[in-house]
Amino acid sequence: MSEQKSMPPKKRGKVTIDEKRCKGCWYCIEYCPTKVLKVSEHLNEKGYHPPELVEEPPSKVCIACHLCELYCPDFAIVVEEIK
Amino acid sequence: MNPMEEMRREEEKLLRTDRLPHVWCPGCGIGITLNAFLRAFIRSKIDPNKLVVVSGIGCTGRAAGYVNVDSFHTTHGRGIPFAVGIKFARPDLNVVVFSGDGDLFAIGGNHFVNAARRNHDLLVIAVNNFTYGMTGGQHGPTTPTGAYTTTTPYGNPDRPFNIPHLAISLGAPYVARWTTYHVNQIQNSIYHALHKKGFRVIEVISQCPTVYGRRNDMKTPLEMMHYFQKNSVRKDDASFEELELSYNGKIVVGVFRDVQGIPTYEERYEDIIRRAKK
């Protein structure tokens, strides 16, 4: 009865943040499904706290969903898929 | 290359990156809308040389300055008349009016009404942030009843414009409304609208935490986004009463009208020229 659905291939991404463009709205941190981003403690040159990647615990990995890219109003995030 | 990475690279080419970071406040929804528009445009595979972005005055009016295609930053409220002129002179171009609520519905309200009535072949992306952001948060024609702004410190007594209702009643063939929370839906909606003809209106409810949210208990960008997240309801066949925006109430989103086959003004004009030449 139950069809065995093949799982989609596991995707992994690499998040690059352009700190010069970031204005610290933190939508990326809020809407990341795997919560790989957090507020950093340092300031960028405009005086905002840009996001940074959390320290690499194995459960928190970027799955290359690109949602942070779509939510970023400042065009400051690029997600690259890594093989 | 991965299509999303390809898109991001293409997007950088369509932006005037030397002018970034842009002037919009932290968490402003106009950036999200512009991002969605550029991605939808890249997906549509239209030649960038065939795109013209026209915008009026205001926060959203600055969008024309950040796109690396032919763009016009027009006088206040006159985005649609300029766009009509461009479309008449060069019917092969895709003309997009990217402007704000104050520009399109207050000072440019009459232009919007008449362009919609005549069904000009334009795509209008109206970013509605409920207020005049650039001049300091005065109340405008889209401010919900009861909202607090700098000029309505005891609550706004006016009723706001019901933009989808207005556009549908004037016969616009494509009318949609989204909030900036719906990033993928805005993108898909713009993508579909780019392939249609006629006066297409997409209203994007956007957050203005700096001057609107601050006075209405939504101080941070995230609080405004949570408000959209909690209160938006998708209903494509919503009645006109349901489409009306209320203060802190539900936001009905969706594609409310999507019809084909209504002749555009440009087509009818061509027809008249043909008949006159006989």
Image (tube, coloured by chain):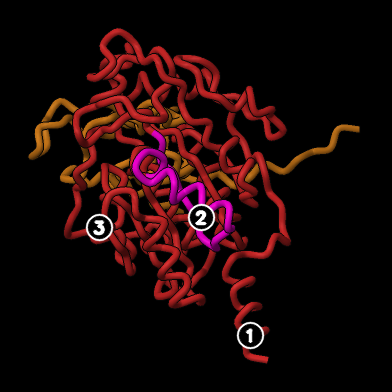
Chain colours: A orange, B red
* Residue B26, placed above or below residue B67: above
The picture quadrant where one finds residue B274 is bottom right
Please name the residue shown 67% across and 29% down the image.
B235
Q: Decide whether residue B114 is among the magenta residues.
A: yes
Point out the tag, 3 or 2, that comes first from the N-terminus: 3
Q: Which residue is the site of mark 1? A: B276
Q: Chain of mark 3?
A: B
What span is in magenta? B104-128
Point out the tag, 3 or 1, that comes first from the N-terminus: 3
Circle 2 SS class? helix
Please name the residue shown 60% across and 60% down the image.
B198
Q: Which residue is the site of mark 3? A: B65
Nearest-to-viewer mark from 2 and 1: 1
Residue B269 locus on image (x, y percent): 59, 73
Q: Which residue is the site of mark 2? A: B115
Report the side of B208 relative to B110 (left or right): left
